Image (tube, rainbow, N blue to C red):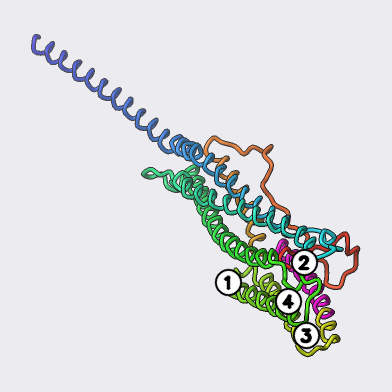
Amino acid sequence: MRDEVEALWWLIQDSERRGLFVAGAIVLLGLVVFGAYYYFAKLPERMADDYRGRAQPAAERITDSMDEVYKGFDEYLDETTFPLRRLRNAADYDEFKRRLLPIMDDTRAALQRSQTAVNAAQLTIEQTQADLGNVPSAPLLGGSGSIEEAEDAVSVAREYLEASATFLADFQRFIDYEQRSLTIERRYLAQEPESNSLESADLATVHDAVQSDLKEAQRTRRALLRLDPPPDAEKLDELQVEAANIRVDFYDDFLAGIENLNQAQIYYAARDYFIAAIRINSQQMRALQAFAANSHLQDATIRLSGMADELEDTIAALGSGSVDQSEPDRSRKRPTPPPPAGGGGDEGASEKVSVTS
C-alpha cells in the first residue's frame, strides 16, 4: 500500500510540474507574440515619429532659409529695373549721374543681401543634412509601412537638398558676375567725361579731352570683355558689351571729326550715338524682363518652392503625424515676360531700362 501511495504522490507532483511548464510556456508565448506585435506593428510608427521629430524642424529651417534667398533674388530684380522717366529729360550729365548712381548703389546693396542669404542657406544645408538624411532602420523592418514612408521622405529630402545646393552655386556665380559688372559700369559712370566739362576751349584741348574719353571707354570695354558671364547672363552681357561698343564708336567718330575739321562728321557721330543708345536700351530692357521671367534661376526658384511644400508635407504625415492644411504653400509666381517686339503702349509709363545701360 505504501508503494502505491508514494507512486500516486509522485504522479501528482509530475502533473503539477507539467501544468506549471505549460502555463509558463503559454505566458512566454504571449510575451513573444506581444513583443513581435510591438516590434512589427508599433515600433515602425514610433521610429517614424522619432525621425519626424528631428526632420520637421530641420526641413523648416532649410526651406525658410531658401525663401530668404528667393527674396534676395526678387529684390535684385526689382532694383535692376525702373521707369525710364526717372532718367528722361536730365538737364546734363551731372543730373543723369545723380539720378542713376543711387539706383546702381541700391542694386549693389540688393546683391550683397543676396550674398548674405546664400551664405546662410549653404550653412543651413550643412547643419540639417544629418537630421534629414538619417534613415530609421531596424532588423526585419525594412520596407514596412511607416519605415518605408520615412525612407521615401529621406529620398525627398536628399533630392531637395541637392537641388538647393545646385541652385545656390548657380546663383553665387551670377552674383559674382553681376557685382563685377556693376562695379565696372559704376566706375565709368562716376568719372565724368572730360569733354563734358569743357565750356570753351581751343581745338587742341577739345581733341585731347575726347581722346582721353575714348581711351577710358576702351578700358571699360576691355574690362567688360574679360567678364565670364554664367549662361543665364550671356544675353545681358552681350548687350552690355554692345553698349560699350557704342560709346567707343561715338568717341572714335567724334575724334575723327575733330581731326578732319568736319562738323558734319561730328554731328553724325552724335546722331548715330543717340539712335544706337535708344535701341540698345530697349534691347536691354527686354532682355532683363526675359531674364526675370524665364531664366534658369527663376525656373529653379519655382521648382524648388514646389519641392519645399512636398518635403514639408511628406515629413509632417509620417508616423502618427498629419499635414496642417491651414499652412500656406510656398509656391512662387513667374514674373510677366516682355511683350512681343514692336508692341505699342505708353512709353513713358511702361518702358524700363537696365541699370547697366
Q: Sequence order check: which comes first, mark 4 or mark 1?
A: 1
Tell me which residue sits at (63%, 67%) in the image.
184
Name which quarter of the figure residue 111 lies in: bottom right
Q: Position of residue 143 (x, y in %)?
A: 45, 48
Of 33 and 176, the residue lying toward us: 176
Residue 177 on the magenta span: no
Direction top: furthest residue: 1
Task: Name the amino acid type tagged 4.
Answer: Arg
* Element type at mark 3: helix
- The residues tagged by marks 4 and 2 sit, at their Cα atoms, a distance apart of 18 Å
- The residues tagged by marks 3 and 1 sit, at their Cα atoms, a distance apart of 36 Å
Q: Which residue is mark 3?
A: 258
Of 77 and 240, the residue lying toward us: 240
Q: Which residue is mark 1?
A: 228
Task: Name the amino acid type tagged 3.
Answer: Ile
Q: Position of residue 299 (x, y in %)?
A: 66, 61
* Element type at mark 4: helix
Q: Position of residue 162 (x, y in %)?
A: 52, 56
Q: Which region of the structure is painted magenta?
A: 271-294
Q: Sequence order check: which comes first, mark 2 or mark 1?
A: 1
Q: Which mark is residue 285?
A: 2
Disc 2 crowd, CA 10 A, few/some/many (<14, 14-19, 20+): many
**CB-based contact (under 8 Å), mark 3 and mark 1:** no
Is 105 on the left-hand or right-hand side of 169? right
| Front of the two marks 4 and 1 | 4
**CB-based contact (under 8 Å), mark 4 and mark 2:** no
For the N terminus, give its image quadrant.
top left
Main SS of the magenta part reads helix
